[in-house]
Image: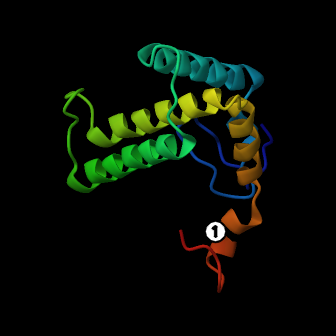
Amino acid sequence: METNSKLKQQTSDQKPDSEYWDKSQWVITYLEMQAINSIAKKVHGNSLEKFGGNDEREVGTLLALIHSEISEALEGFRKDLWDDHLPYRKMAEVELADAIIRILDLADRCGYDIGSAIAQKHRYNMYREDHKPENRAKEGGKKF
């Protein structure tokens, strides 16, 4: 790593917080993209098995189910609850996992390469001008 006084030493638990941060460690690799796609295939395969190979639910229903998992996660955060089914985990954590499972199921069902879409969108977001703290602080900037 460069020995520039403006550069910070990096650890895996730190998040980018300045323009001087080496963002290369946050780039999603090809193997990671493939792993996401592999998980999506497994999740969708399980879903198909539950529905006898014929899941006829429309996309709107599946998106609503994703939304419901997010709403349940919010409730878990708001009330600091433990999960009913996995009582050693926080409810919010489990509901976020449920949302991811449902998203991956839908993505594979639609034939999306969700792994590379995540990688590309993540990389795009890393360099978005409107996501920089100084631009968020400006008049008309994104507050959240």
Q: Name the residue rendered at 77%, 50% in the picture.
A: 124
Q: Can residue 67 be seen in this view?
A: yes
Q: Return the x and y of residue 27 as percentages of the image width and height.
A: 73, 36
Q: Which image quadrant is residue 134 in? A: bottom right
Nearer the observer, 26 or 71: 71
Left or right: 65 as drawn, with respect to 14: left
Left or right: 120 as drawn, with respect to 82: right
Q: Name the residue rendered at 53%, 68% in the picture.
A: 144
Q: Name the residue rendered at 27%, 31% in the picture.
A: 89
Display colour scheme: rainbow
Secondary structure of the residue carrying tag 1 is helix
| Numbered circles on residues, count | 1
Q: Name the residue under label 1.
A: 133
Nearer the observer, 126 or 18: 126
Residue type at numbered disc 1: Pro
Q: Return the x and y of residue 88 as percentages of the image width and height.
A: 22, 27
